[in-house]
């Protein structure tokens, strides 16, 4: 890339934050390999663009005349078919990350500095001037920007990453087109939901250009995949409620008696069913789930839906004073809201759980329920879509471009969502048709209770002891801890278990563990530590780099060297003695510096040649040569 990036961070980041409770991290699937991809649209280049990463379109022509592609081009094949599904799943995961900021103006930049967060803009947004994303020395710092409309940058705009921010943890998501104006320097993945994406002349992107359904155009520009792995926690449904969905937990769409119909290229994640009634129109849709129609499965689902409805109307009411109209920028806390007649939603409605993952929101209407065009429900401070329910004694009708959260149940009436709608939840009807038009719908699973964090970590270290590798780690407390596993990899993608070490089960005091691996690997390796609780849940802590312990040198070891730009650094001694590290070119210019010790260094994009690594040990300076190959 034209603008080289030298982050004082490990090459491959911890896959799960040590502070996440049973959290999963963002999984891009095959999309992780693509620098440019669209599920449905053409891809076109102008001029001498340089793209590092794969390029693909599942439906649409690809024209890359004049471009240099350091990767593979895929077009309408098995790879793009899987990538289209993985892109939709990536979008769903990102939309599920809790919003932390709803007050920022639609305009970003003008030399502002932002800290980690999920920023929601209800409509279109823009970037002008410089925007600095400050990770505050946290390599897991997350920056997600979500726009309810289009997103564009002004000419010569730039995004700057400081203090540990990684481009793989930066995402820009729009419900419309995305356009980067000339000479924009962009960091992070750009994902347009059903819109076109463009990158004008002389742009420089470290990230991805993605569209679920839209054309992508660029050039002449430079774009390259991030050299790290996302650590964004994607929380599963960890809250609790007493509503038993039974077999309905697997359904995104279900009616006991009525037709289910689709128009356009909807994407549905979850099963679709009707106990009595036809199912049609899904030939142009993407359905990640199964269809059930008038069979044993739907018979059970019909019974479960009746039970679910009874449960929902039996929950004690906490509010009878709210007006029939919801939205208009208001924020509500947990409760059961009863409207005697029909109700509506217009504008934005925020549901604030106040940090309680068990917070339940139930909205009951004695008549129909409707939403206005471009209405939106936002979940704040731990609110979960699986804990939100909308129950109407009449038809439910969601207008175009509605962004909805929760399960919508129409009792003895139809349930519909118009073009461009986005629902994280379910559409149910006891007796009524269900209709959708070019929407995105994904069910989020049943909210279940989880145990407290099984282990509170303190540290994990690995070092050579002769030709063996010695591991030691410390924990603060243990709860239902079955065992630890030490896993090895040569590339941080494929892992094998080296050994399993029994845990204490339960302990409220700090404890130290150690293990010596006498295997002579004969090559540098990455190791990570995981913990498995009594229920089989696995939690990962950290990744460390260890040189080939069979080498006879003492002190620092750089591997590989020469390298195309990524160097692993190991030290026989105590890494805590390292004060700082600096890399200079042969003219004495500093191109990289950091405090303390870093086991992996990026020099990607640096001109080929020799560089000098200076390691300040306080009383002494160690020096190593680094050779960057073409």
Image (cartoon, rainbow, N blue to C red):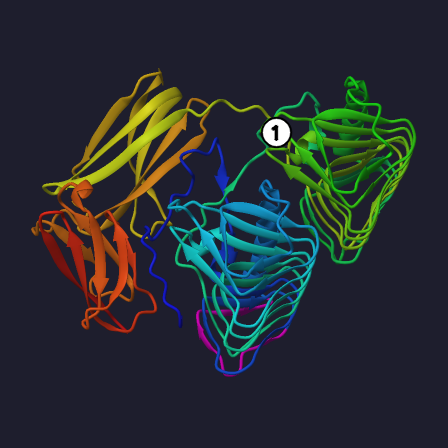
Q: Secondary structure at mark 1?
A: loop
Extreme residue in the front direction: 111
Query: Quick one: 340 or 84, which is closer to the camera?
Result: 340
Please tell me which residue lies in front, 616 or 307: 616
Residue at point 76% right, 56% down? 283
Image coordinates for residue 504, horizontal then vertical, percent: 32, 18
- Quadrant where the C terminus is found in the figure: bottom left
Tell me if I can see residue 2 in this picture.
yes
Task: Identify the residue at image location x=42%, y=32%.
Answer: 538
Q: Does 546 appear above or below 516?
A: below
The picture quadrant where one finds residue 41 is bottom right
Residue 168 as seen in the image, left or right of residue 390: left
Residue at the image point whose x is 18% and y is 46% from the top: 578
Q: Is residue 420 above or below residue 248?
A: below
- Classify residue 175 as left or right of residue 494: right
- Where residue 203 appears, as percent x and y from the top left, is 50, 72
Q: How many marks?
A: 1
**In terms of image quadrants, where is residue 109?**
bottom right
In the rendered view, tell whether residue 500 sits above or below residue 593.
above
State the image coordinates of residue 413 (x, y, percent, origin top left). 90, 36
The one nearer the camera, 156 or 51, is 156
Q: Is residue 374 left or right of residue 39?
A: right
- Asked if residue 460 lies in the magenta stretch, the reply is no
- Tell me where residue 28 appears, x and y as whole percent: 51, 52
Q: Which residues are magenta?
A: 61-76
Say which quadrant the N terminus sits in: bottom left
In the figure, is residue 613 to the left or right of 499?
left
Decide if residue 293 is in sight here: no
Q: Which residue is mark 1?
A: 354
């Amino acid at each position: 890339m034209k603008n080289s990036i030298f982050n004082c961070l490990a090459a491959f980041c911890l896959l799960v934050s040590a502070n996440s409770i049973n959290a999963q991290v963002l999984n891009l699937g095959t999309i992780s390999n693509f620098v440019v991809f669209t599920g449905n649209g053409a891809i076109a280049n102008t001029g001498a663009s340089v793209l590092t990463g794969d390029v693909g379109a599942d439906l649409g022509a690809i024209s890359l005349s004049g471009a240099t592609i350091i990767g593979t081009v895929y077009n309408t094949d098995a790879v793009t078919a899987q990538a289209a599904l993985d892109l939709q799943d990536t979008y769903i995961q990102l939309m599920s990350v809790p919003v932390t900021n709803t007050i920022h103006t639609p305009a970003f930049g003008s030399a502002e500095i932002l800290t980690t967060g999920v920023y929601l803009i209800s409509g279109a947004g823009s970037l002008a001037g410089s925007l600095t994303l400050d990770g505050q020395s946290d390599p897991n710092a997350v920056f997600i920007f979500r726009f309810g409309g289009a997103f564009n940058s002004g000419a010569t705009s730039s995004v700057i990453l400081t203090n540990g921010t990684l481009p793989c943890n930066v995402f820009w998501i729009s419900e419309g087109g995305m356009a980067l104006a000339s000479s924009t320097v962009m960091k992070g993945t750009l994902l347009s939901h059903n819109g076109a994406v463009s990158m004008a002349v002389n742009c420089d992107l470290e990230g991805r250009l993605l569209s679920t359904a839209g054309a992508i155009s660029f050039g002449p520009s430079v774009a390259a995949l991030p050299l790290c792995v996302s650590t964004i926690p994607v929380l599963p449904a960890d809250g609790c409620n007493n509503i038993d969905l039974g077999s309905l937990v697997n359904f995104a769409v279900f009616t006991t008696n009525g037709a289910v119909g689709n128009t356009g290229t909807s994407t549905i994640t979850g099963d679709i069913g009707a106990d009595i009634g036809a199912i049609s129109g899904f030939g142009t849709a993407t359905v990640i789930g199964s269809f059930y129609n008038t069979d044993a499965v739907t018979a059970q689902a019909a019974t479960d839906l009746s039970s679910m409805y009874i449960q929902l109307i039996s929950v004690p009411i906490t509010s009878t004073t709210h007006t029939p109209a919801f939205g208009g920028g208001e924020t509500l806390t947990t409760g059961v809201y009863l409207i005697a007649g029909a109700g509506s939603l217009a504008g934005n409605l925020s549901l604030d759980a106040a940090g309680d993952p068990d917070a339940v929101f139930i909205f009951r209407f004695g008549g129909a329920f409707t939403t206005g065009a471009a209405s939106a429900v936002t979940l704040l401070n731990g609110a979960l879509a699986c804990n939100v329910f909308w129950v109407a004694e009449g038809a439910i009708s969601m207008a175009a471009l509605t962004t909805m959260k929760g399960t919508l149940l129409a009792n003895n009436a139809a349930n519909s969502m118009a073009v461009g709608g986005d629902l994280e939840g379910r559409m149910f009807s006891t007796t009524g048709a269900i209709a959708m038009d070019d929407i995105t719908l994904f069910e989020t699973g049943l909210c279940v209770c989880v145990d407290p964090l099984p282990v509170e970590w303190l540290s994990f270290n690995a070092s050579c002891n002769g030709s063996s590798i010695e591991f030691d780690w410390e924990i603060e407390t243990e709860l239902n801890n079955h065992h630890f596993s030490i896993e090895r990899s040569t590339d941080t993608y494929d892992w094998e278990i080296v050994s399993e070490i029994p845990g204490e089960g339960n302990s409220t005091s700090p404890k130290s563990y150690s293990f010596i691996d006498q295997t002579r690997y004969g090559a540098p390796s990455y190791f990570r530590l995981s913990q498995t609780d009594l229920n089989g849940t696995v939690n990962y802590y950290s990744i460390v780099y260890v040189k080939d312990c069979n080498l006879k040198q003492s002190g620092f070891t750089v591997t590989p060297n020469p390298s195309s730009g990524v160097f692993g650094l190991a030290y026989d001694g105590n890494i805590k003695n390292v004060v700082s590290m600096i890399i200079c070119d042969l003219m004495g210019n500093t191109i990289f510096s950091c405090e303390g010790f870093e086991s992996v260094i990026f020099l990607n994009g640096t001109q080929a040649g020799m560089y000098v690594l200076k390691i300040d040990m306080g009383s002494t300076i160690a020096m190593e040569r680094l050779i960057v190959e073409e």
